[in-house]
Every structure is written in C-alpha cells, then in structure tokens.
Image (cartoon, rainbow, N blue to C red):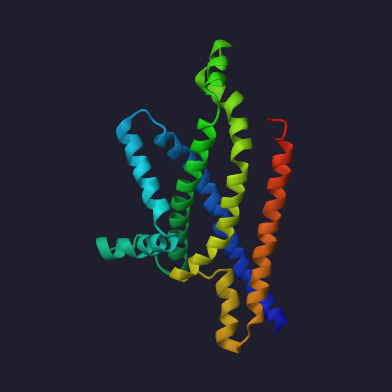
C-alpha cells in the first residue's frame, strides 16, 4: 500500500509542478506588461489595467477558475478549452496566469516606483537612453527590492495549485485524498503535506541564496 500511495503522490506532484512552472512562465512577463500599463501616462489604458487588477485581486481564485472554465460554454455555447483532462488543464493555466500576473504586476510597480527619480536623471545625464537606464541601472535594484514579496507569492502558488481540483484536474491533494474514499486511510494526506513543505522549503532556500547574492545593492 505504501508503494501505491507514493506512486499516486508522485503522479500528483508532477502535475502540481507543471501548473507551478507553467504559471510562472506565463505570469512573470505578463505581470511586467500589466505593471507598465498601470503606470502608463495614457489614462484610458491605465484605468483599464487598474480595473482588471482590482477585479482579479479582489475575487477568489477558485471563483475565477470556475468562471474561466465554465463561462465560455454557458455564455457562448462553445467549449473553447477542448475536451477531457487536457482542456481542463489549459483552463487552469489561463486562470492561474491571469491571477498571478495581476499580483506580480503590483509587486513590479512597487519596486519600480521605489527607485529614486534622481537615478533616472543621473543615467540620462551620462548619455544613456531610457531603455539603457532601466536595464543597466534600475532593473537589478528592482529585482533586489521585490524578492521578499515575490518569494511569498511563489510559495502561495505552490499551495494554490491545489485549487485545480475544483475543475477535476488531478493534482497532489486529489492524489492524497483519494485514499480516504477508497481505503479509509488518512496518513496519505500527511505525506501530501510533506510534499508541500519540501517544495516550499526549497523555494525558501533558493530565494535566501538569491537575496544574499544581490546583497551588494544597499
């Protein structure tokens, strides 16, 4: 039984890691684009981006998952995600990427706006373009300042992947819970918790090392 439990948990953890990494691949760059929109001087774009961020951050991710997966079929009368587990997985990724991109955008915005205006002006005095000032002077300082809130969001994402089961995506929690119904066993859930603790612990160590590496930015 122990071997069977570990096999199921490993299968579920692979899906959890897929959701985690694919969400980051999509949400990190999208969040940066959204942050530029919320800081734009073009007021209609700024207002639109801020409204989207407000809606996404102000509603539960579980609700967003349900609406994104079932909404197109109920409103448009067409399943745009495709059939079976692959379609559900795509819907999960879309919901997670949009949700976390909005959270990341606020972290990016806070980091960028925390850089003193004098540094932009000094870079321009040295003959650098605005693009060069951003990438050569500002960006690394922003990365240093946003690492703590980013690490928190990464760890939250690890745990939020469990919400994928709401639209029947087989992930780690589902893999552990199935043994309660089939065999009346509770201990697989404790093993599930150990998996999450390991994932979170590895992320904590990685971010601590990264912060130490960037500690020369005081």
The image quadrant that residue 214 belongs to is top right
Coordinates of residue 8 in the picture (x, y in percent): 63, 75
Q: In this view, which residue lies farthest toward the left?
A: 76
Coordinates of residue 148 in the picture (x, y in percent): 62, 45
Up-down relation of residue 174 to residue 130 (above or below)? below
Coordinates of residue 188 in the picture (x, y in percent): 65, 78
Q: Is residue 77 visible?
A: no
Up-down relation of residue 167 to residue 22 (above or below)? below
**Residue sitting nearer the eye, 200 or 78:** 200
**Residue sitting nearer the eye, 168 or 50:** 50
The C terminus lies in which quarter of the figure? top right
Relative placement, left or right, of 86 versus 145 is left
Q: Residue at x 60, y 83 (%)?
A: 179
Q: Is residue 34 visible?
A: yes
Q: Residue at x 68, y 30 (%)?
A: 217
Up-down relation of residue 122 to residue 34 (above or below)? above
**Residue sitting nearer the eye, 18 or 186:** 186
């Amino acid at each position: 039984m122990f071997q069977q439990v570990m096999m199921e948990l490993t299968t579920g953890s692979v899906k959890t890691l897929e959701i985690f990494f694919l969400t980051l691949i999509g949400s990190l760059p999208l969040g940066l684009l959204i942050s530029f929109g919320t800081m734009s001087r073009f007021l209609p774009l700024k207002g639109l981006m801020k409204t989207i961020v407000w809606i996404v951050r102000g509603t539960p991710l579980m609700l967003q998952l349900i609406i994104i997966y079932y909404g197109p079929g109920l409103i448009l009368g067409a399943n745009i995600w495709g059939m079976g587990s692959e379609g559900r997985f795509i819907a999960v990724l879309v919901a997670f990427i949009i949700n976390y991109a909005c959270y990341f955008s606020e972290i990016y915005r806070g980091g960028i706006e925390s850089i003193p205006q004098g540094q932009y002006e000094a870079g321009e005095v040295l003959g650098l373009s605005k693009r060069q000032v951003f990438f050569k002077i500002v960006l690394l300082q922003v990365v240093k300042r946003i690492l703590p809130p980013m690490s928190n969001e990464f760890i939250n994402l690890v745990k939020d992947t469990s919400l994928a089961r709401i639209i029947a995506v087989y992930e780690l929690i589902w893999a552990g819970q199935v043994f309660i119904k089939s065999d009346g066993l509770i201990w697989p859930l404790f093993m599930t918790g150990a998996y999450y603790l390991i994932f979170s612990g590895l992320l904590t160590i990685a971010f601590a090392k990264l912060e130490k590496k960037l500690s020369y930015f005081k």
